[in-house]
Image (cartoon, rainbow, N blue to C red):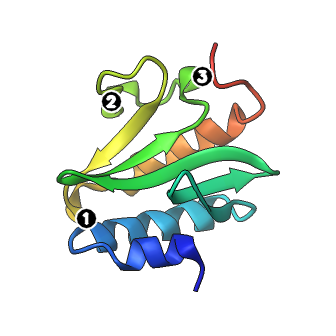
Protein backbone atom coordinates (compact mmCIF):
# COMPACT_ATOMS: atom_id res chain seq x y z
CA UNK A 1 0.00 0.00 0.00
CA UNK A 2 1.21 3.48 -0.83
CA UNK A 3 2.07 5.79 2.10
CA UNK A 4 -0.54 8.32 0.95
CA UNK A 5 -3.28 5.67 0.99
CA UNK A 6 -2.06 4.36 4.33
CA UNK A 7 -2.23 7.89 5.78
CA UNK A 8 -5.86 8.24 4.66
CA UNK A 9 -6.96 4.80 5.86
CA UNK A 10 -5.38 5.17 9.31
CA UNK A 11 -7.46 8.28 10.11
CA UNK A 12 -10.33 7.88 12.54
CA UNK A 13 -13.87 8.69 11.53
CA UNK A 14 -15.24 11.00 10.27
CA UNK A 15 -11.87 12.10 8.84
CA UNK A 16 -11.20 8.88 6.92
CA UNK A 17 -14.57 9.16 5.15
CA UNK A 18 -14.00 12.84 4.38
CA UNK A 19 -10.57 12.14 2.88
CA UNK A 20 -11.79 9.16 0.87
CA UNK A 21 -14.61 11.30 -0.53
CA UNK A 22 -12.22 14.14 -1.39
CA UNK A 23 -9.88 11.65 -3.05
CA UNK A 24 -12.74 10.32 -5.16
CA UNK A 25 -13.92 13.78 -6.24
CA UNK A 26 -10.39 14.99 -7.02
CA UNK A 27 -9.53 11.92 -9.11
CA UNK A 28 -12.88 12.03 -10.93
CA UNK A 29 -12.58 15.77 -11.67
CA UNK A 30 -8.87 15.73 -12.55
CA UNK A 31 -7.99 12.30 -13.97
CA UNK A 32 -4.35 13.33 -14.47
CA UNK A 33 -3.83 14.10 -10.79
CA UNK A 34 -1.26 11.83 -9.15
CA UNK A 35 -1.53 11.11 -5.42
CA UNK A 36 1.87 11.13 -3.74
CA UNK A 37 3.10 11.27 -0.17
CA UNK A 38 5.01 14.53 0.34
CA UNK A 39 5.64 16.58 3.46
CA UNK A 40 4.23 13.57 5.41
CA UNK A 41 0.72 14.05 3.96
CA UNK A 42 -1.22 13.01 0.83
CA UNK A 43 -0.34 15.52 -1.88
CA UNK A 44 -1.72 15.64 -5.41
CA UNK A 45 0.59 16.54 -8.28
CA UNK A 46 -0.34 17.43 -11.84
CA UNK A 47 2.31 17.25 -14.56
CA UNK A 48 4.96 16.83 -11.87
CA UNK A 49 3.96 20.02 -10.01
CA UNK A 50 2.26 20.35 -6.61
CA UNK A 51 -1.49 20.91 -6.86
CA UNK A 52 -3.31 20.27 -3.57
CA UNK A 53 -2.98 18.35 -0.32
CA UNK A 54 -5.15 16.74 2.33
CA UNK A 55 -4.27 16.92 6.00
CA UNK A 56 -6.20 15.88 9.07
CA UNK A 57 -5.46 18.16 11.98
CA UNK A 58 -7.32 19.00 15.17
CA UNK A 59 -10.99 18.38 14.43
CA UNK A 60 -11.10 18.86 10.65
CA UNK A 61 -9.63 17.92 7.29
CA UNK A 62 -7.82 20.63 5.35
CA UNK A 63 -7.81 20.54 1.56
CA UNK A 64 -5.11 23.05 0.65
CA UNK A 65 -4.29 24.43 -2.77
CA UNK A 66 -0.72 25.10 -3.84
CA UNK A 67 -1.59 27.99 -6.15
CA UNK A 68 -4.34 29.40 -3.92
CA UNK A 69 -3.08 32.99 -4.31
CA UNK A 70 -4.65 32.90 -7.79
CA UNK A 71 -8.00 31.30 -6.97
CA UNK A 72 -11.10 33.40 -7.57
CA UNK A 73 -14.04 30.98 -7.26
CA UNK A 74 -15.88 30.77 -3.92
CA UNK A 75 -13.28 32.63 -1.83
CA UNK A 76 -15.84 32.90 0.97
CA UNK A 77 -15.62 29.11 1.47
CA UNK A 78 -11.85 29.12 1.88
CA UNK A 79 -9.76 30.04 4.88
CA UNK A 80 -6.20 31.26 5.31
CA UNK A 81 -6.20 30.57 9.09
CA UNK A 82 -3.31 32.90 9.86
CA UNK A 83 -1.31 31.96 6.77
CA UNK A 84 -0.20 34.57 4.28
CA UNK A 85 -0.78 32.69 1.02
CA UNK A 86 -2.12 29.14 1.41
CA UNK A 87 -5.92 28.84 1.33
CA UNK A 88 -7.80 25.72 2.32
CA UNK A 89 -11.23 24.22 2.42
CA UNK A 90 -11.98 22.86 5.90
CA UNK A 91 -14.30 20.00 6.60
CA UNK A 92 -15.45 18.86 10.06
CA UNK A 93 -18.01 16.38 8.71
CA UNK A 94 -18.61 14.50 5.48
CA UNK A 95 -21.97 16.23 5.17
CA UNK A 96 -20.19 19.59 5.05
CA UNK A 97 -18.59 18.73 1.71
CA UNK A 98 -20.48 20.51 -1.05
CA UNK A 99 -19.44 18.75 -4.27
CA UNK A 100 -20.55 21.63 -6.49
CA UNK A 101 -18.30 24.09 -4.66
CA UNK A 102 -15.46 21.56 -4.42
CA UNK A 103 -15.49 20.78 -8.15
CA UNK A 104 -15.67 24.49 -9.06
CA UNK A 105 -12.64 25.24 -6.88
CA UNK A 106 -10.73 22.24 -8.28
CA UNK A 107 -11.43 23.43 -11.82
CA UNK A 108 -10.39 26.99 -10.91
CA UNK A 109 -7.16 25.69 -9.37
CA UNK A 110 -6.52 23.58 -12.46
CA UNK A 111 -6.99 26.61 -14.72
CA UNK A 112 -4.26 28.54 -12.85
CA UNK A 113 -1.97 25.56 -12.18
CA UNK A 114 0.87 27.08 -14.23
CA UNK A 115 0.99 30.23 -12.11
CA UNK A 116 3.40 30.40 -9.20
CA UNK A 117 2.83 29.95 -5.48
CA UNK A 118 2.81 33.74 -4.96
CA UNK A 119 1.04 36.41 -7.00
Q: Residue at x 56, y 47 (%)?
A: 52
Q: On screen, 39 above or below 24?
A: above
Residue at the far right: name it: 47
User: For the residue labelled by badge 1, is the local secondary structure a helix, a strand or a loop?
Assistant: helix
Q: On screen, 70 above or below 26?
A: above
Q: Left or right: where does residue 81 sit relative to residue 19?
A: left
Quadrant (top left/top right/bottom left/bottom right) for the N terminus: bottom right
Q: Residue at x 63, y 65 (%)?
A: 35
- Find residue 110 and report its image quarter: top right
Say whether disc 2 or disc 3 marks the residue closer to the N-terminus. Answer: 3
Residue under circle 3? 70
User: For the residue labelled by badge 2, is the local secondary structure a helix, a strand or a loop?
Assistant: loop
Residue 62 picture location, percent across and down: 36, 48
Q: 54 or 24: nearer the eye? A: 54
Disc 3 vs disc 1: Cβ atoms closer than 8 Å?
Answer: no
Residue under circle 1? 94
Residue 47 picture location, percent across and down: 82, 51
Question: Which mark lies nearer to you, 1 or 2?
Answer: 2
* Mark 1 crowdedness (10 Å alpha carbons): few <14, some 14-19, many ≥20: some
Say whether disc 3 or disc 1 marks the residue closer to the N-terminus. Answer: 3
Quadrant (top left/top right/bottom left/bottom right) for the C terminus: top right
- Find residue 77 and report its image quarter: top left
* Distance from the alpha carbon under mark 2 to that under mark 3: 14 Å
Q: On screen, 84 above or below 87?
A: above
Q: Residue at x 61, y 31 (%)?
A: 67
In the drawing, what numbered circle is on residue 79? 2
* Mark 2 crowdedness (10 Å alpha carbons): few <14, some 14-19, many ≥20: some
Residue 42 picture location, percent across and down: 52, 61
Amino acid sequence: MKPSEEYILKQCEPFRSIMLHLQSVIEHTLPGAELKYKYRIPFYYIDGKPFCYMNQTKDYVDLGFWNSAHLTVYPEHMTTAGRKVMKTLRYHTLEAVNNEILVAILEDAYSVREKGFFK
